[in-house]
Every structure is written in C-alpha cells, then in structure tokens.
Image (cartoon, rainbow, N blue to C red):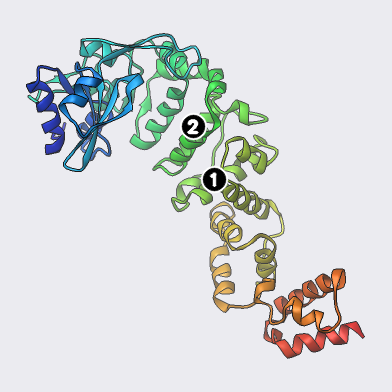
Amino acid sequence: MPAVYPPKYVRNILVTLQARGHQAFLVGGCIRDMLMGRIPQDWDISTSALPEQVMEIFPDSEPTGLKHGTVTVKMNSRLAEVTTFRSEGAYSDHRHPDMVSFVGDLTTDLSRRDFTMNAIAFSPDGLMADPFGGVADIEKHLIRAVGEPQLRFEEDALRMFRAVRFSSRLGFEIEQKTLEAIRLKAPLAVNIAPERIRDEVQKILLGPAPEKVFQLIELGLMDSYLVSRPQLIDDGGSLTRLPKKALNRWTCFCVLLENYGCIDSVEEFLLKLKLDKRSVRVCRSAAKILTDPACPQTPVEWKRLLNKYGVDAVSCAAVCGDRLRDGNYQKQLKAVLKSGECFSLKHLAVTGKDLMELGLCGRDLGEMLLFLLDYVMEFPQFNKREILLSLAQGTEE
C-alpha cells in the first residue's frame, strides 16, 4: 500500500501544533486517498487543541465552523481544516448533532465518523491510528460503517447516500451488514434536504460508475421522489457511455425512470430535487423528444425541433438518443446546425416591423411570421427579404 506523504505546508501545521503541546493528526478522506495512491483534494486535521488555541497559534486562520470546533488554517496561501477532537450528542433531525463536546482523545473522535476507510489517522512522525480496521477494508475494497451501521445512519441519513457515492467513485462494494442497514433505514431519507440529495445523485451521475444511481432506487433511498420502485433496473450501460455532462446524464436518467414507470413527470421529479430552472427546462424538453416514437428523419424535422425546444435541449436529446436508440442523431443535427439554415424567427430574413409596414398587425402579424418561418425551414434557399415580403403580400391578397 502506498505511503502517506502530505504536502509540506500540511506537515508544518501538524508539527507546529505538536510543538505547542497538542496532539495533531491527518484524518479522513485525505488518508484514504493517499493510501489508494490518489491525490487528495482537501486536507483535514484533528487536534486536541481547542479552536481558540488553534487561532492563537495560526493568526491568519478563519473560524469557519466554531460550533463544531473547525478552524480553516491558511499557510503559504494554502488551506487546511483543523478540527478539535469531539464527540457528538443525539441527532434529533437525523442530520445534525444536537450538541458537540470537545474531547481529549483521538479514538473517541474517530468513532463518530461514517465509514472505517474515513476513520484512519496519521501523525507527523509517521504513526498511523486505525482503531476500526479501515486500512484492511481499503485493501478489500469494502465500505463498512464505523461501529453499528444502523446507529450511524440514524445519526445522519445522508451517510446512506454517501455510501453509494463512494461505491461508485472508488469501485468498492458496500459491506453486507452496512448494506442491509441502509435498506432498513432508507425511510430516514425524508429528513434530508432535496438539495443535498440532488448533489449526491449528480456526483454519482458524473462519476465513473453512474449506473450506481439505480442502487439508490433499489435500496429505497429515493422513494419520496418516485411513484413506484422497481426491484431491478438495467440501463444497458447507457449512462456510462454518455459524455460526463450533467444535462446529458440527468436526461438519460429521467428517460429511463419514465420507461420503468418510476416517475410520471420529468419536470416534477427534477423540481422536487431543486434542479435549477434551465436544467429542468432542457431535461424536460430533451426527454419529451426522446420519448416521442416519431424520430426526426429529415433536416426539416430537426429544424422544427430546434425551433420548438431550442439548441440545448435538442443537442442533449441527440446525444442521449445515440445511446438509447442506437441512432445517428448527433451527426444529423450537426449537419443542420452547420448549414446555417434558418430555424428561428431571429434568423428569418424579415422582421415583425417589415410586416407591419405591409399593414399586418396583431394576430395576423404573428401567424404570418410563423407561416414564413415554416416556409423557409422547408425551403431554406428562399430565406431572402424580397421573396418573403412578396410572399407575405401575395398571401394577404
């Protein structure tokens, strides 16, 4: 297993705390990642020093979570989170501890963590503390809850989603007792804010094994967002074959959910999960295109779709359609867009003002613009001002 070599500024923080008489350890995901040969994105340090003592030792630090004992230390323009050893009280809302108590020993601090692979500590002198067998579980590629898994999930229901996300990201299996605890405690997911669930789902969708998102459904974690829950969903690898773009994978995910009868409405499902308005609009429109049995076959049909739904939604539908229907939609769409042919009023060679000068107004004006647009979508060579004005005059006579 690879050795643990934190960067110099992190070692300096650890050594400085030790020199002032405090215990200090690297903990959590950074240790896990280094043991797996990965480069950590964040650095977390646990210490016996109280928050005010940390801030005294490091004057440039910021009190980013004093309630929970966390201080962000800045050294050489780089950051690390330093948190006092702590224990936690009851979790009345199944998300946050009612109270936090600072303690003096590392093992108590590690015992409150979610999974064994995240409950490993490393000291600046090279000693490793692993009271719950996290190193062995990493070697086995296993996600195991610290202590009693049901209790861990009763404390914080989001940990159940994190277990599936870690499984997706790391390629680990969830240990059987931990998995059964998730299945049993899945109803507690109603206590989690939709935004947090949305973020976990998106991280899985954009990860190396996006099909794991269906494990959330199989375990019952998404029940409050679905109208039904099939026992098994097989996406045929569609999600994995898609580019790692959020709109593409959300759209494909929603289409598959519709196909399995899990949701009645893409829009309603995404709004419940608090996706932003643009994403909801694009995914809803792209899903509607994909669920229409009539596939676009000609440039005119593609232009009509572009006019009705917009470039973003149609492009998304084309990408997903190539995977879900084994089509050739992206190539067809690219040819239409590259042609520069008109598919929207803003590219029409005449404007509403031009038609008003012919005496058109109100409903007649709007209908004429749509007529001319439909005409040039079918006959792009006639998108010329004089031709369209003549056509408008001739139609009115």
Q: Is residue 219 placed above or below 301 in the rendered structure?
A: above
Residue 9 in the image: x percent, y percent?
A: 14, 37
Sequence-first disc among 1 and 2: 2
Q: Amino acid at mark 2?
A: Arg
| Image quadrant occupied by the C terminus | bottom right
- Identify the mark at residue 196; answer none if there is no mark: 2
Residue 239 in the image: x percent, y percent?
A: 49, 46
Q: Marks 1 and 2, how far apart in space? A: 16 Å
Q: Nearer the viewer, residue 161 or 353?
A: 353
Within-10-Å neighbours for mark 2: few <14, some 14–19, many 20+: some
- Identify the mark at residue 250; answer none if there is no mark: 1
Res 3 seen here:
no
Q: Amino acid at mark 1?
A: Trp
Q: How many marks?
A: 2
User: Is there a contact, CB below 8 Å, between mark 1 and mark 2?
Assistant: no
Q: Is residue 187 placed above or below 359 in the rendered structure?
A: above
